[in-house]
Image: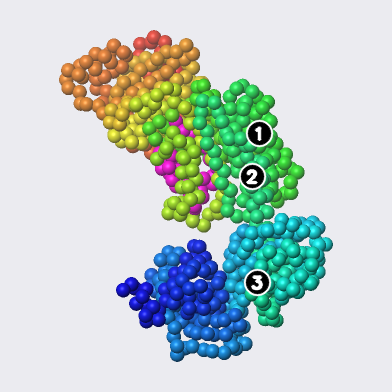
Amino acid sequence: MRTEDVLAAVGHGLWQWDESTGTVTVDGRAARLLGLSGGPATHRSSEVRACLHPADYVALAGAVSLATAEGTVAESMLRVVGDDGTVHRTVRARLRPQGPLLSGTLHEVRHRAQRGAAPAGDWRRSREAFLLDAGRALAEADSTAEVLRVAAGLSMPGFSPDGHAVFGVEGDRLSLIGHHGQEVLDTALLDVSLEAEYPAAMVVRTGQAVYVHSPEAYQERFPYSWPMVKPYGRTSWAYLPLVVAGSTIGAWMAAFREPVEFTPDERSVLTTVARMLAQALSRAHLHESERALSDGLQRTMLPAREPEIDGMAVAARYVPTGGGLQVGGDWYDVIDLPSGRSALVIGDVQGHDVRAAGIMGQLRIALRAYAAEGHGPDAVLSRASRFLAGLADEAAWDDVRFATCLYMEVDPATGTLDVARAGHPEPTIRLGDGTTILRRTAGGLPLGVRPDSDYPTTRLVLEPGEVLLLCTDGLIETGGHDMDTGWRRLAEVMEAGPAEKLEQLADALVGAVAGPASHHTTGPLADRREDDIALVLLRRDPDGPTCAVPVRRTVLTVRQNDPGQIRSARHDIGAMLHDWSSADQRESAVLLVSELITNVLVHTDEDATLVAQVTGMPGTRSLRVEVGDRSDDMPHRRSPGEMASSGRGLLLMEELADAWGVDPRGDGKSIWFELLEARPPLDAAAADTAADTAGATGTDAGGGATAAVAGLTNLDAIAGFEDADLESLEGLEALENLLDPGGGGPDGGPDGEADGGGDGGDDPGERPAADR
């Protein structure tokens, strides 16, 4: 015997409520208990709710919610009522939540059965429970479609509409906004004149509800529109005005298949529902208007086409903040330059309002105009700063705005990037093997702070296969992060890739910050306000097949008037060697880079150009660093005496580097050194060979170098040397003294003496005419 037969034999019926589809499936016994006709069938949930006492339904919903949270079975007593509110029977309902499905049984409880009309107090409680439920549902609806869906599912106490229609006023016309219950059979109902003899139009004209009890009454009162509504097969209609702040914005029609008398209580319920429906539609319309305004405004401010640069892949994203009009001052742009190159621009105007968006639009147009005139990055930002300062002079004193900006001129043929920054976050580069480093570039004040600000240009090189990230601070700080923890979060996503699919990488970056995963990586500033997000990814396409051995390469120019860039050079070298097998070698590389650049700035009048490259596979890699300048004076090996003041820098190179040398060039020279990641210990024969090779190339591979370096270099003191100490010439000379504690005189190259063919310069007070 089937389970259904056993349950039916003991008076139990089966029912299943599907909240996802809004349907209820009952067997024959459950249909009889609920007063549903047709035997076993699937009904709309509103039909079943109309058979239940509203207060009992509210209690059932609470029991189901609790059972869902606790993983138990919901049980509740339900009174089955007729159309007049009479209680026919009381049933016990049991439901087990399984996702959106609620499955269980029904059986009658005879000792609780009640007959007779429901008392007036019971009707009022039912009405209050229904209105509370309807008000909550309408308050949560945030779109017109959602409001109409909620209205279609309303089950009023004792009577439920079989069809709904909502009309809106547009000038002198009444248009159909939405409907439920049956398809529109006559298109004349879609757009009606307010002067027409149609109940909805009369309601809007007079502001008074219209109730029609029967088809005969409709035909007699509105003969013009009766042929249009007759095919729908309804028997009673209620037309009510939708009023907001004293203004009628439309009309709501509720149609019934069964005759309705529209008693005072029923009219009270319909009137209250119409008021709540009007408020919900007004809120939804305002929300949709704001959303359309923000979308249109943002589309106007952003590039009209997808960013493109020949020979390079570009991906960009803009994510507005979650509040207000969802517009702000973040933007990005790609500009075609007269030279045939392209410019990437990304910026952020202070604020998250319409004024910020307006200033952003003006600034974007100004930047495009200055770039089209052929100016370089520094001149473009200088002019833009004066332009924004001029806007501030015209604004109210308490609403002055500034903007951060990064302007980058891109040469796709060579991968050269000329960067100028105005208070904007630094660019980030993902190298070919996945290593991600923050590239330190020179910068100036935000735009508009001081009209005559200067914006120095930094030249970078993007190698084939490398990916550049430009972003606003929203991508870094959203989620309560500061600049440090935010960069670490982005670096993890950049390293994971995929670098060859920029669109996926852009989505991954946004998802890590604004998606569900970001809630698990909140930073130390959890109460920080969320911000707009703008980002641009740029990848230089590899020339030919991808190289099997990844290469890391960085280029940096340290100018005479900006010695603080030595800190950036040390940072870049440390980042390139972040996974180097020997920490001592990594520290040695950073120390030697500081020594080479410092010598150029102290002993010449030229800028220093650093080129560093890591090649090979992990464990067998090599680092080659070149520091070039435009001075023609070449360094010479010396044998300084015990009291000599200079000439010992070469010993430091010989001790720490695996190889080093000086290469003359047409416009100066380049001093280089190499480090091998895995150096096997040298036996005696290999040591002799290395000494012979060093002697032939001008390097000292032995002869007490270790003892000399140990006696003249305090590595602990150098490691503790502060970055701030390098901001002046005195600081550089102090570092030079740490590297050469025996004296303070300058020398050629890396502490070599450019003595013009002298004999070694035993006089400690003697300073060569040509440094380095």
Closest to the observer: 338 or 400? 338
Identity of the amino acid at label 2? Answer: Gln
Against 740, is 248 above or below? below
Identity of the amino acid at label 1? Answer: Leu
Give the distance between the C-alpha atoms of the residues marked 3 and 1, in whole angstroms.
63 Å
Specify which label sits upstream in the sequence, 3 or 1.
3
Q: Name the residue under label 2.
A: 298
Q: Residue at x 46, y 53 (%)?
A: 516
What secondary structure is found at the residue carrying circle 3? strand
Image coordinates of residue 189 in percent, x first then y, are 73, 59
Image coordinates of residue 144 in percent, x first then y, are 64, 59
Callout 1 crowding tier (Cα within 10 Å): few <14, some 14–19, many ≥20:
many
Q: Where does the C terminus fall, quadrant-wise?
A: top left
- Magenta segment range? 466-495
Q: Name the residue under label 3.
A: 256
Left or right: 674, with 190 as reference point: left
Against 254, is 738 above or below? above
Give the distance between the C-alpha atoms of the residues marked 1 and 2, in whole angstroms.
18 Å
Left or right: 12, with 280 as reference point: left
Checking the image for residue 367, the label placed there is 1
